Image (spheres, rainbow, N blue to C red):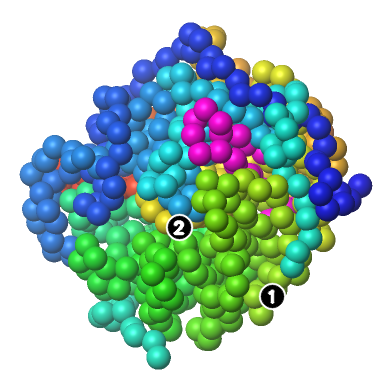
Amino acid sequence: MTQPPGQQPPQGGFGAPQEPPHGVPQPPQGPPRTPPPAAPPQAPATPPTPPPTQPGYGYPQQPGPYDKPQQPGPYNQPQQPGPYGRQPGPYNQPGPYNQQPGPYNQPQQGPYGQQPQAGYGFPPQQHPGAPVPPGPSGPGGGSPFKRKPAMIIGAAVAALLVIGGGVYFATSGGDGDDDKPVAEKSEQVAKPSGSPTVDQGDGNGTGRKEDDDLNSGRKDGEAKVLWLQKNDVDLPRNGADVYGPWIVGDTIVKGMYRTVSGYSVADGKQTWTLKLPADICSAPEQTTSDGKIVIAVKNGTTDKADCSALQQIDLNTGKAGWKKELKKSGLFDMMSDLSMAISGDTVTAGRTGAANAFRVSDGKEVFGKRSGNCQPFAFAGGPKLIAAVNCRTDDVNNPQQEIEELDPSTGKAKWTYKPARGWEVEKVYSVTPLIVSLTKGNTSEDKKWSIIALRENGTLRSQLKSDKGDKFSPDCGGGFTIFGQRLQGCTGVAADANTFYMSTTDDTSGSARTNRVVAFNLNTGKTKWKANAPAERTMEPLGMEGADVLLYIDGGYGKGGGIATLSPAGGSPKMLLQHPDSTSEIERSFYNPKVQYADGRSFITSGRVSAGNDKEELETKTMMAFGD
């Protein structure tokens, strides 16, 4: 039933803050891990974190001396992590570098800085209709997929804390009317320095000579290692985040540092490389239907450079298209990072204080900063363009935010949903159907979390309610951001027209980790069913595969992972592609990995690449592909 203005959402869901769980077991010991590199010099300092665990392939190494971009050289002198270095911590505290490897970690960002993921970045609290995380008592023993919590910066430091125990869905309602979201209706360009250059590549790729050896231990029924890609980019001393990858036809493309490269999905051979004049600083999850994308590049190579140069690229060929320099519109227009999304032929560039959108095809501006008190600051794209809107108020501790669906061709709002005062838009778990994560509170003591589903017309459809004791922590990764916010990029969640699927945090009470996937009825918000992962394994939704839920199943130590499906009626997972046991150590050791499945092939890509010296840099594994 449509909820009228001012009426409270359904009761139940997340109730009073939960007490931190006691005696949470420590995660099993894995291969050695070294601490990740220090963050860029301009990054704000964060509290010290506990000693790091041990490194694997692709895990950031200790930083080397200051780099000279695009030149071989002095990366081989180890350097102690600086004050901004992020090391894996037992509480899964948010931060771009403090995450442990896990195939599902995606970059996450917050409206004023990166906000923690559900379960990672929430103190013990509950939000109406959404799971609520326990307090910061867990030892970071979350699922192996959830190893890259987000980073809290600036104003967000006091807003959210990360916890490793996961998020609780409670069975009782909120503390009062203000604890429930309420639905209301309302209503000359400089070019980047330098010019991109395209290298069509020699077709040799990297790391190809090992492929035959990697399949030597393959058993019957296991997939083949199609290829293993090693790093081919000369990196700065602190390493670099990986953007994408994007699969366009028979090419898989990733961006890193000052390079965007395309590789054959069949054999991993490099097909083209585009050199950029400065660091990549933001990119959307999506491409256009014809394989074009617009990324953000810094407008210089100094520490004072802004993330303001937009560059269009044809990912089929690697050819650079139009480029624009965003104009700063006022003192509070922070150009540190951008919220980018593509819907149709429109790409957005949102940030604190302003937002712009351009046609991907020709670079013409579609819309810019609005007049009035309410400004979009973050976007989710795909079949629809969804905007998170911030409205200026006299009380910064009690914000007013809104959710809008925009017409991508004009930027005009089709509808507006206004949550109760104090609730902020955190993530969009699904655009169609629209499922949004909201948070409320500025400290770990009063933080609350809610997940709501909205109808096509923007009215409240339901507020999710979990069974008592269930804990959740969708993994949205954690690229380093200060003022921007990425609304999309979460794993551990999936949705079809009537059901929302979310994985629980890991149960570590037995001899090995395991977890479940819980299905929620989007019309009622109630639990429909729960499916258990295979024995001594964990699983996370990646999306939908036809009518089925697409899963990545983590194999554990000495066991290969794989891609599986789960019926919309529940039951047991059905394996589509079993990765070899013999390469499980490599599979598990990618730093902050992203897992994708397309046309019968699975791809694991490192989310960040770093090394202590030149030799290690060239030996670092960055992508791996499996298939029949």
Residue holding disc 2? 484
**Up-down relation of residue 600 to residue 386 (above or below):** above
* 1 or 2: tag closer to the N-terminus: 1
Rendered location of residue 223, percent (x, y): 52, 38
* Side of 250 where 281 appears, left or right: left
Q: Quadrant of residue 573?
A: top right
Task: Give the residue pinned by disc 1.
Answer: 412
Residue at position x 74%, y 37% in the image: 177
**Which residue range is magenta in the image?**
431-450
In the rendered image, residue 414, in percent from the top left (x then y), is placed at 75, 69
State how many labels appear. Answer: 2
Question: Is residue 437 inside the magenta stretch?
Answer: yes
Q: In the rendered view, would you say 97 is above or below 331?
A: above
- Please give left or right for residue 395 compared with residue 313 in the image: right
Does the image show residue 50? yes
Position of the C terminus by quadrant: top right
The residue most toward the right is 1
Q: Position of residue 302 (x, y in %)?
A: 20, 66
